[in-house]
Structures are given as structure tokens and as C-alpha cells.
């Protein structure tokens, strides 16, 4: 799924059957170990690695949930010792808040929250909040009044950004749905044996429709009738007014090609990103942080160096904010902008960066320009970045570089064959791939070739070639095996 703003790709999300997301899922877990030294416990929820449960995600008296999108700051709060809150062997109902990343298992919390279209339902809380993106004071007061009138003791809610101008009737209807869901979760947890999945969060399509598709979105274009009908059915129940903005894509040209998304995806894995001014930025992910370096490149201006540098820095601020969203970068980010002489220009740069970061759904925080001329920032880390999830260490160079995973190569092949089908020039194509990719198709997607042949009306043959690189493939057309790779494979 791709999100475009002003015809530019800003977010890319992918779901794969072999790598499903777990954030939002609710589990009945069992405490494996309690570690007072780090104020945390490890909980078995059935995943490969035990889940991490920090004391701040257990302590009831310190769980003042923030309004949606507010910065979370618990560093100054005092919590009771973790061993007073949980013990080894204890059954505990938890919700995943972060995906497993690298060598770390998922992070979980006992503070359950159930997101709906307009509300977030929080059992066991007293908090009534309104998204800070709803800025009108009277509207905020009206929504709080409805919530306090409807919500019983022992339950908290946050009214989401899309809930602006929400009526009491719709509030009551969604609150009842979420309340009933919570009752079902409690019943299942009571009879289940840990570790067990008790409630699955909405997956990519329905979750994004629920969280992102609002009246501020011009259109939603869907390739595939099944997903199209699923989305329409969901909207009929929650927001019928948006139905006119949903379109089924029927053009034979692949959807991502139509909107030039394929090219933008390839750029998301490059170190260098060029700026409109002629400058460029270099993005380097490391274990500890992501460093971003800004350079003027060929843009040197004519008379005023400070003006030239400011222009490049402002361009870079906009592009950095987009790249962080596109690459789904999380954790610490350090930006080395070009040094400027005046404090006013540094303040303007910081404001520009914060303005563009304001469009990010993930929580971000940019700090003042440091004495070294760096801007340090943090971005909420919920799942592995695009770089981590779609690439793996290159064995040929001892892990210094990255290559595309076999499943990513297969998706590129699929899109290339679709282009072959659209052109209708080749009826017979041999696909040559690295043995690892061929083995992946054989073991993980055995019907891949048959499905493409059936849907795209092209005769296909898959051959492994040990002399090829893992991320490489070749398309050979017809009995003469004419190489047509560059014609149909982008990048």
C-alpha cells in the first residue's frame, strides 16, 4: 500500500503471509523471568523471542495515557519495583506495542487499548482525551462532554483526529462495539491457556482504512476486486460518505507503474537522494542511529553563500521528513546540515523541519541545533524499517552491504511479467534467477508460475543460474532467448 501526497510517495507498507505484523494483537502470556536490574520482565506470548515488558507498561498509577499523537515522556516518573507488580509464572494479558526488531523480541504492555474508527477504548483507565490535532477549543470541550456523559467508570477513551464533529449517536454506537469486543476478549482470556493469541488487530488494509482514510484524502485507488469489496463493505458501516472516493483500478498497466511508485521504491534504498536545488543528502543506517548528511553539490549560488546554504538546508529538511516516513526509520536520527552563520537561519531551519515532520503519523521530536551544528531527533520505532524488512546482509561482502531478499526479487519478477503481459509482444518467457530465489519459489510459492501463466496469459519457464547475483534476474523471450530484461524490469 502506497500513500501519495502531492503526487509524491511518502509512505509504503507491505504485508506478507510469512511475516505478519503483531502490533496491536492481544495475548495471554506467561511471565518467564523478572529482572529487577532493568525494571522489566520477559513474557512468553508464543513468538520466537520472549516479549519485553517494562515496569512503565505495568504500573497502574503511572499509566496516564497520552492523547493520540502526543509525545510520550515517562523518564521522570517513579515506578514501584517490577517484582512487586509481576512474578515468574504469572498469567498476564498483554498487547504488542512494537514488532520484533533485529535480535530483540516484541515489546508489550498491560495497558490494553482497542482502536476504532473514531475512538480508542482503554479498559481500566480514567483518562478522557481528544487528539491534539483537533485544535478548535469549543469542539474539544464538546467532544469531552459527550465522552464523560457516555463512558462509565473504569474505562478511558481518546477521541481520534477523524472524530472531529462526531455526533453523540455515532460515539455511542462505536463505544458499544468496542465495549462488547473487550468483553469477548476477557471471556477468551479466562478460558485460554498461555501462551495464546486472544485478539488480532486489524491487518494492513482494514487498519490503514480505519486510521488514515478520512475526508482529507482525495481518493483511494484499489487494484483487486476482493480488497475493493472488502473496503466498501467496511466503509458502509463506519463512514458511507467516503464511498464516492473509492475507485477500482481496471487499467492493464500495473497500478504502481501508473503512478510511478516503482521508481520511488527503488530510490528508497539508495544512500544518496538528490534535492531540487542541486544539493543532495546521504542517508546511512547504523545499529545505533541513522545519520543524514546534507551537501550543496553543484548548487553554489552566485553572490550570497549564506542564502545558498539556507536554500539547500530548507530543501533538505523537507526531503528528510519525507524519507523518514518513506523508509519508516525509527529511533535516533542525527542530521548534519550545512553550517550557517546566523541564529535566525538556524531557527528557521528547525521550524521548517518540525513543520514537515508534523505530517508524520509516527511521533517525532526534533531538538535544537547543537554546538556541533547537528539536529538530533527521534522517531517512534514500532516495526523494522523498510531497509531492515526488505533487505538482508550480503554474504559476498561479509555483511558490509545488503541484497534484496528472495521474496522481494520474486515480487519484482511478478511486476516485470505483468508489464510483459500489458505489451503483448512476448508469449514465451524464460526467467533466469539465482538458485536461492529458485529454491524460495519452489518451497514457499510453488504455484507462483502457474498463477502468473493463468492470470497473464504468458508461457513461463523458471531456470536457476549460479553465476547470477541473488537480487538479479533475466527475462529471455521466445525460442531464440532474446534478453528483454531492460525492457520490462525497472532499475
Image (cartoon, rainbow, N blue to C red):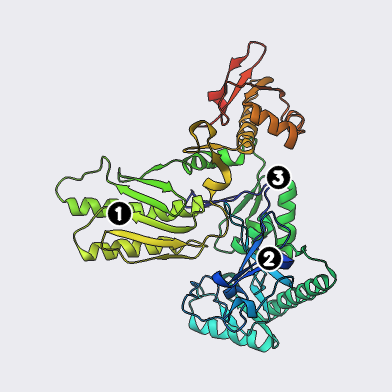
The disc placed on residue 224 is 3
469 horizontally vs 169: left or right: left
Question: Which residue is situated farthest in the top direction here?
Answer: 480
User: x%, y% of residue 448?
Assistant: 73, 33
Q: Which residue is mark 2?
A: 43
Residue identifier under label 1: 337
Q: Nearer the viewer, residue 133 or 128?
A: 128
N-terminal of the two: label 1 or label 2?
2
149, 166: nearer the viewer:
149
Q: Would you say residue 166 is visible in this rendering? A: no
Q: Earlier in the sequence, mark 3 or mark 2?
A: 2
Specify few, some or many for label 2: CA neighbours under 10 Å numbering under 14, 14-19, or 20 or more: many
Residue 250 in percent (x, y) is at 67, 41
Measured Cα–Cα span from mark 3 to mark 2: 39 Å
Q: Secondary structure at mark 2?
A: strand
Neighbours of disc 3 within 10 Å: few (<14), some (14-19), many (20+): few
Q: Is residue 446 above or below residue 24?
A: above
Quarter holding residue 382: bottom right
Tell me what residue is drawn at x 65 percent, y 50 percent: 247
Left or right: residue 395 compared with residue 479: left
Amino acid at each position: 500500500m502506497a500513500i501519495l501526497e502531492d503526487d509524491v510517495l511518502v509512505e509504503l507498507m507491505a504485508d506478507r503471509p510469512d511475516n505478519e505484523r503483531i502490533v496491536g494483537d492481544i495475548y495471554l502470556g506467561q511471565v518467564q523471568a523478572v529482572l529487577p536490574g532493568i525494571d522489566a520482565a520477559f513474557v512468553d506470548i508464543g513468538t520466537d523471542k520472549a516479549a519485553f515488558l517494562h515496569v512503565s507498561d505495568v504500573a497502574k498509577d503511572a499509566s496516564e495515557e497520552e492523547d493520540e499523537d502526543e509525545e510520550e515522556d515517562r523518564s521522570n516518573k517513579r515506578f514501584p519495583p517490577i517484582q512487586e507488580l509481576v512474578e515468574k509464572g504469572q498469567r498476564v494479558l498483554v498487547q504488542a506495542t512494537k514488532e520484533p526488531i533485529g535480535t530483540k523480541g516484541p515489546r508489550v504492555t498491560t495497558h490494553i487499548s482497542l482502536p476504532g474508527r473514531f475512538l480508542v477504548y482503554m479498559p481500566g483507565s480514567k483518562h478522557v482525551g481528544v487528539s491534539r490535532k483537533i485544535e478548535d477549543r469549543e469542539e474539544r470541550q464538546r467532544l469531552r462532554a459527550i465522552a464523560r456523559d457516555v463512558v462509565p467508570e473504569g474505562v478511558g477513551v481518546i477521541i481520534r483526529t477523524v472524530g472531529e464533529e462526531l455526533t453523540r449517536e455515532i460515539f455511542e454506537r462505536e463505544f458499544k462495539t468496542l465495549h462488547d469486543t473487550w468483553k469477548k476478549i476477557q471471556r477468551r482470556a479466562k478460558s485460554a491457556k498461555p501462551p495464546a493469541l486472544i485478539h488480532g488487530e486489524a491487518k494492513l488494509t482494514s487498519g490503514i482504512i480505519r486510521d488514515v482514510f478520512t475526508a482529507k484524502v482525495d481518493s483511494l485507488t484499489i487494484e483487486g476486486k476482493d480488497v475493493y469489496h472488502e473496503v466498501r463493505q467496511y466503509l458502509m458501516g463506519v463512514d458511507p460518505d467516503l464511498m464516492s472516493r473509492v475507485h477500482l483500478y481496471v487499467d492493464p498497466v500495473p497500478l504502481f507503474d501508473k503512478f510511478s511508485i516503482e521508481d520511488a521504491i527503488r530510490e528508497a534504498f539508495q544512500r544518496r537522494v538528490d534535492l531540487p536545488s542541486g544539493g543532495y543528502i546521504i542517508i546511512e543506517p547504523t545499529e545505533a542511529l541513522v545519520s543524514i548528511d546534507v551537501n550543496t553539490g553543484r548548487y553554489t549560488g552566485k553572490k550570497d553563500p549564506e542564502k545558498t546554504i539556507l536554500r539547500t538546508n530548507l530543501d533538505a529538511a523537507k526531503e528528510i521528513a519525507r524519507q523518514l516516513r518513506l523508509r519508516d526509520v525509527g529511533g535516533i536520527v542525527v542530521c548534519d546540515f550545512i553550517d550557517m552563520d546566523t541564529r535566525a537561519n538556524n531557527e528557521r531551519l528547525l521550524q521548517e523541519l518540525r513543520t514537515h515532520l508534523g505530517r508524520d503519523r509516527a511521533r517525532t521530536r526534533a531538538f535544537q541545533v547543537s554546538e556541533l551544528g547537528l539536529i538530533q531527533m527521534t522517531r517512534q520505532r514500532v516495526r523494522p524499517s523498510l531497509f531492515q524488512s526488505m533487505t538482508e546482509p550480503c554474504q559476498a561482502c561479509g555483511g558490509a552491504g545488503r541484497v534484496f531478499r528472495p521474496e522481494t526479487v520474486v515480487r519484482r519478477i511478478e511486476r516485470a511479467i505483468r508489464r510483459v503481459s500489458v505489451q503483448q509482444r512476448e508469449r514465451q518467457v524464460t526467467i533466469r534467477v539465482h538458485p536461492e530465489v529458485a529454491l524460495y519459489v519452489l518451497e514457499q510459492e510453488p504455484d507462483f508460475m502457474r498463477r502468473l501463466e493463468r492470470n497473464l496469459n504468458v508461457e513461463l519457464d523458471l531456470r536457476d543460474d549460479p553465476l547470477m547475483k541473488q537480487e538479479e534476474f533475466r527475462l529471455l523471450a521466445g525460442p531464440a532467448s532474446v534478453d528483454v530484461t531492460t525492457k520490462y524490469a525497472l532499475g
